[in-house]
Amino acid sequence: MEHHLTEDQRSIRDLARTIAEEKVKPVRARYDEENIFPRDIVEAMAKADLFRVFVPAAYEGLVEDGLGITNVCLVTEEISKACAGIALAFAGTALGVFPIVLFGSDEQKRRYLPGIAAGKQLAAFGLTEPMAGSDAGAIRTTARRDGKHYVLNGTKVFITNGGEADVYVVVALTQPERGARGASTFIVEKDTPGFSFGKKETKMGIHASVTRELIFDGARVPAENLLGREGTGFLVAMKTFDISRPGVAAQALGIACGALEETLKYVHHRQQFGQSVIHFQGIQWMLADMAIQIEAARTLVYALADRIDRGDTKDIGHVSAMAKVFASDVAMKVTTDAVQIFGGYGYMTDYPVEKMMRDAKITQIYEGTNQIQRNVIGAHLVKEAARLAG
Ligand SMILES: Cc1cc2nc3c(=O)[nH]c(=O)nc-3n(C[C@H](O)[C@H](O)[C@H](O)COP(=O)(O)OP(=O)(O)OC[C@H]3O[C@@H](n4cnc5c(N)ncnc54)[C@H](O)[C@@H]3O)c2cc1C
C-alpha cells in the first residue's frame, strides 16, 4: 500500500533503498559473521546526505519543520530491510541527536550538529547501567560539579555505537540523594579525559552494530555540556524515547518487509510435490498473514511519525509504545514464519532469513522492553478508565 509521502520524503526513501540494495545487501552476511562495523556504509549514507535528515536546517541539516521523524523511519526501514545491524549506525546516531535537538542550547547545537549532519561524527545515547535497565531511575553514575566542569563516575552498559561514536549523550545523577529527580544529561565527547570504553558485547543478532560499555572514571566534562537544566535528566530521556521509538518500530518493520520479500522469492522457486510451494494454500495463508501484519505496522508507524512531525506530541508516549510493541512483535512473528516457510534451508546461514529472525528479537527488548511498553499503555488506559467513569 502506498502511503502519502512528500516529494522530499520519497527521494530520501529512494536514496536509502538504493544504498540498501547496492551497498548493504552484498556485505550483510559477511559483516554479520565477522562483526564488522559498517564504516563504508556510513560514508555512503553521509555522501547521500542521509545523516542530515534528522538535523534542523539551521544546523546544516535538511529538516525545515518538525523533527524529521518520518525521514528517520524511512531511512531506518529501508536499510533494515537489508540489514538491521547496519541500520543501527544511523538509528543509534539519531537516538543520540534527538536530546540535543530537543533540549540543546543554540551553542550546543552549533557545536555538535553540523559534524553529525555531514556524517563525519556519529552519536550515541547512554542511559542503561548494570543495575538500571527497565528501572532506569536506579542509575548510579554520578556527575559532581567541580568549578567549570562536572566530574562523571560510573559505568553504562549495552550502549549502541559505543566506541564508534564521537558524541555521547549520557544521563548521570547530579543530586544522587534525589534519585531520578536528581538526574541530568550531559554531552560527552569521545576523547574526554577519564572516559573510556569497556566490554564489547557478543550478541545473538545485529552483529554489525557495536554494543559496548562506557566507563567514566573521573571524566571531566565542561559545565557548558549540561543539556537543559540540572534535574531534568529523566525528562530528557523520556521525551527522547517518545520520538525515537518510532525508529525502533521502523527498524522492526524493515526487518519484517525484508523477510517477506526473501520468502516470496523463495516460494516462487522452491518445488515440492511437482509444484512451486507458493501454490500450497497453507503457505499462501501464512504469506497473507505476514503481509497483513506488515501493512498494519507500516500504517501505525507512518501515522505516528507524521503526527510527531506535525508537532502533535502531547500525550504521545503510549502511542509511541504501541507502535514499538506492535511492529516488533510483527517482526518476530514474520521472521519466525519466514524461517518456517524456508524449511530446513531457513535454518541455515545460506539464506538471510535466519539472520533476520535473530535481528528481530532485539526490537522487542531495547528502548524499553515490550513489557515496559505495555505498562506505559496500561497506565494510559487506567487514566482513561477513570476519565470515562467520571
Ligand atoms: C543490543 C542492545 C543495544 C542497546 N542499546 C542501548 C543504548 O544505546 N543505550 C541505552 O541506554 N541502553 C541500550 N540498551 C539497553 C536496553 O534498553 C535494556 O537492555 C532494556 O531496557 C532492558 O533492560 P535490562 O536488559 O536491564 O532488562 P531488565 O530491566 O533486567 O528486565 C528483565 C525482564 O523483566 C521485565 N521487567 C522489568 N521490569 C518490569 C515491569 N515493571 N513490569 C513487567 N516486566 C518487567 C523486562 O521486560 C524483562 O523481560 C541496549 C540493549 C541491547 C541488548
Image (cartoon, rainbow, N blue to C red):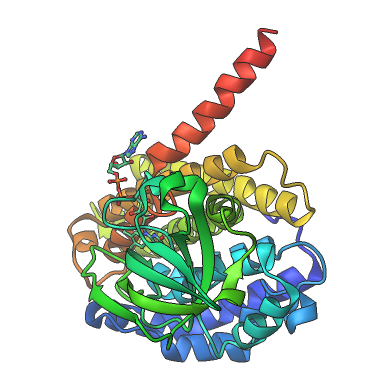
Residue nearer the viewer, 248 or 137: 137
Q: Position of residue 79 (x, y in %)?
A: 50, 72
Tell me: 79 left or right of 314.
Answer: left
Residue 288 visible, this angle: no
The residue sitting at 47% across, 54% down in the picture is 175
Image height check: is 390 above or below 240?
A: above
Counting the numbered discs, the total is: 0
Can you say whether 302 is above or below 59 in the image? Answer: above
Which residue does the image show at 35% across and 82% down from the upper left?
194
Q: Give x and y (percent) for residue 385.
A: 61, 15
Viewer-closest of 365 and 110: 110
Q: Is 318 drawn above or below residue 52 in the view shown?
A: above
Residue 381 in which image quadrant: top right
Q: Locate residue 329, reporting x and y percent.
A: 41, 44
- Left or right: 279 with respect to 146? left
Where is 324 relative to 73, above or below? above
Front residue (pair 100, 137): 137
Task: Looking at this view, name the residue that lies furthest to the front.
Answer: 147
Residue 212, picture quadrant:
bottom left
Q: Position of residue 179 (x, y in %)?
A: 43, 46
Which residue is rendered at x = 65% and y = 42% of the image?
A: 316
Quadrant location of the C terminus in the rendered image: top right
Residue drawn at the location 34% of the way across and 40% of the way down: 282
| Residue 179 appears in the rendering | yes
Relative side of 34 to 100, left or right: left
